[in-house]
Amino acid sequence: MIRDTTKRKVGILIIDDDEDVCQYLKQFLEEQNFDVDFITDSQKAVSTIKGNSYQIVILDIVMPKVDGIELLQNIKKEDDDLCVIMLSGYPTFERARETFKHDCFDFLTKPFEKETLLETIKGAIKEYGLVTDLNQKATHLIAQRVHDLRMEKKLSLRQLANRTGLSPSLIYQVEHAQTTPSVATISRIAAALNSEMEYFFKGV
């Protein structure tokens, strides 16, 4: 089986003192193609986040040793761009309000349907702009750089097309990320804009 290296898995950390819940969610989310870890000791949460690369944390609000809301605050101090989804088997309006006050993404009440959690995670991926398709990321980066450099050179689409021998419609598609350009296409555009090819691929 050939591994698809154009896809990036979103990393999820589950923090819940109930190991059965953790195992259940881990199995389900891995079946949905996420990278999933879990810990049951809330005191290890911040150090675990520091030592790994996660995009989403699923956090139980009621745990021994460290309160979930306090832990939410500590997680946000460590990485304020980390998406945190709160879980509670004992929901109250005050608890929910407190979690949103500290910038949690959503608050789910136990028990919940697996599909509800999945939809919440999909919403988080969209809201936080988490990149899961590396081809898409590359296409958008190249599009922005072609457009910016063309504007800097004060060239119209037609003028750039004349310089490159490419059609104006193709250059339009490249600039609007409607197509992933070939290396040959980028080479022509780079030469026409007096740029090195590496400029377009930096960070891709």
Image: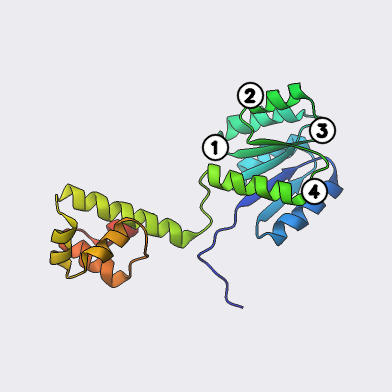
Q: Residue at x 83, y 35 (%)?
A: 89
Q: Secondary structure at mark 3?
A: loop
Who comes first in sequence, dot 2 or dot 4? Answer: 4
Of the numbered discs in the image, which one, if any, rests on residue 22?
Answer: 4
Asked which quadrant contains residue 62, the reply is top right
* Disc 4 to disc 1: CB gap under 8 Å: no
User: Of discs 2 and 3, which sits in the foreground?
Assistant: 2
Task: Give the SS element for disc 2.
Answer: helix
Mark sitting on residue 51: none
Of residues 125 and 169, the one nearer the viewer is 169
Q: Amino acid at mark 2?
A: Lys
For mark 1, give the secondary structure: loop
Side (left or right) of 72 relative to 142: right
Image position of 140 (left or right of 89): left
Q: CA distance from mark 1 to mark 3?
A: 23 Å
Say if residue 204 shows up in the picture. no
Gap in Å between the C-alphas at discs 4 and 1? 23 Å
Q: Evaluate if marks 2 and 4 touch, with contact meaning CB atoms under 8 Å apart.
A: no
Q: Position of residue 140 (x, y in %)?
A: 38, 55
Specify which label sits upstream in the sequence, 2 or 3.
3
Residue at numbered disc 2: 101
Q: Position of residue 26 (x, y in %)?
A: 75, 53
* Left or right position of 111 against 104: right
1 and 2 marks in contact (CB < 8 Å): no
Q: What residue is disc 1 on?
A: 81
